[in-house]
Each structure stands twice: as structure tokens, then as C-alpha cells.
Image (cartoon, grey):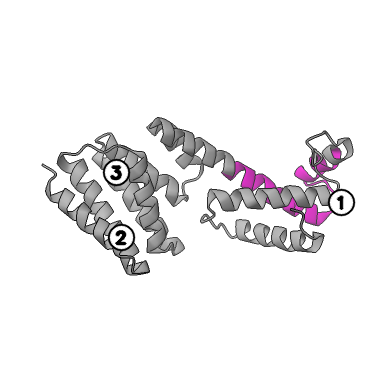
Amino acid sequence: MRHPLRVLMMVAMLVVTVLLAGCEDFTPADRQFVRDLAEEWLRERNMSPTTEDGQVDLMGTIRFGQAMMGRSDDPDANAILGAYGAVSDVLAGDRAMDNARKNGDAAAMDQVIQQRPHDWTYRSSRAILALSQGDLATYESQGQAVNDLAQKEGIPAGRLARQIIVDYQTFTIPETGAPCARKYSDLSNAYQILYEETGDEAYLANAMVATDMMVGCQ
């Protein structure tokens, strides 16, 4: 879908503003949308290294390289390329974190978090992975980091709850002992938050089930 050039410019400049403000609360889908818009904007300005059908555009490649180095005579393009590069870097981090989640790779997660320490979703996943591995100290420290970032950035409680639920669906937690109790305590709290947010009785039922399961952790 092609967007009018003026619309692309407005969206792109908004993205630059948000990135420069340090906003960390883009979802991966948001970031991919921004990157796609930036690519479309570049093609409209004959500054993309590829055409729409994937062929190499020699002049576009030259102008793209100039803008990436901040040497274009188009200041708007220089700004948009800065945003494009930043979003591309974040998307690469998202892919690395997705792979680490899939493989249960704590070291890989730590590396991604080191590169993007303010992404609370990364830290939430790291906390639950640690719990699955019996590492309660990392679970506690990463969980506290999530809470601190959420408070600082004003992340809605419902978003935190949904991320916790997804993380627990990703990693297998032992059904006995302290990890088990923490899992069902977290889930009970998450479902209760979503019930209060939406009024959906299914969330309340899930919260009650999680509370019952927590009692059974021995």
C-alpha cells in the first residue's frame, strides 16, 4: 500500500522525534511498520538501494550511502536515515531475543539486554527464563528491573500482565517448590489485573485457578 509523500514525511518525522526522546515502548510490529514506512519514503525520494521488486538501484544506493553518513544535501533524509538505522538495530535485537527465547539461551538474552537495557519486555522474559532454570536471584533482580522501568516509563499494568502471561507460556517452570509458587503467584496477579481492566470473567476464573495451583506447590 502506497502512502502520499506528505503523510510519509509526517510519520517519519514523528518517528524521529519519538526515537530521539528515547521511547522504548514500541512493539516489534510497531518497529517493523516504522521501518517499512521509512523504506517507502526513501523510494519516493529515489534514495533506496533497491526498487520495489528487489532490484538494485545504483543511484538510490549512492544517495542512500551519502545519507547514512549524514552527507546528503537533504537534511530531512539525513534525519529519516538516522531513524531507519535506529529502528533496524532494534529489530535486529528483537530477532536475537526471539531466538534466545526459543532456545532458552540465558547468555544470549544477557547480551541483547546489555545492548538495550531499557527494554522491559526483554527483562521480563529473562526473569521467567531464570525461574525455569532455578535461578531465583536473577528472577528477582530482573523482575525488579521490569517494575522500575515500568514505573519510570508509565507502562500500563495490563501490558505488563500480558507480557508475563506470554513469558510463562514460553518457558516450562517446575511444578514443585519455590519456582512453582512464584509462577502461579505471578499468573494469579496478572489475570486479576486483566480482569479489573476488562471485566472479563474468564480472567477472574484463570486468576482463581492460578491461586489454587499455587497452594499445591510443595
| Sequence-earlier tag: 1 or 3 | 1
User: What secondary structure is marked by label 3?
Assistant: helix
The residue to which callout 2 is attached is 203
Work out whether 181 lies above or below 17.
above
Q: Is residue 80 left or right of residue 61?
A: left
Instruction: Using residue 34 as the reference point, say whether residue 44 is left or right of it.
Output: right
In the displayed structure, would residue 18 be above or below residue 49? below
Which amino acid lies under the numbered mark 1 shown in the image of this protein? Asp
Residue drawn at (44%, 64%), measured in percent from left and top? 154
Number of the front mark, 2 or 3? 2
Residue 30 position, x and y percent, is 58, 53
The residue labelled by disc 1 is 73
The question of residue 125 being in magenta is answered with no
- Residue 119 position in % (x across, y down): 47, 49
- The residue under the point 22% across, 48% down is 182
Q: Main secondary structure of the magenta part?
A: helix
Q: Distance from label 2 to label 3 (Cα)?
A: 25 Å
| Residue interval drawn in magenta | 62-90
Q: Where residue 10 sits in the image (x, y, percent)?
A: 73, 63
Q: Residues within 10 Å of mark 3 (few under 14, many from 20)?
A: many
Instruction: Quadrant for the C terminus, please.
Output: top left
What residue is at 41 percent from the left and 56 percent from the top? 149
Q: Nearer the viewer, residue 213 or 149?
A: 213
Q: Is residue 59 above or below residue 157?
A: above
Q: Amino acid at mark 3?
A: Tyr
Q: Position of residue 162 (x, y in %)?
A: 39, 55
Read off the residue under disc 3: 139
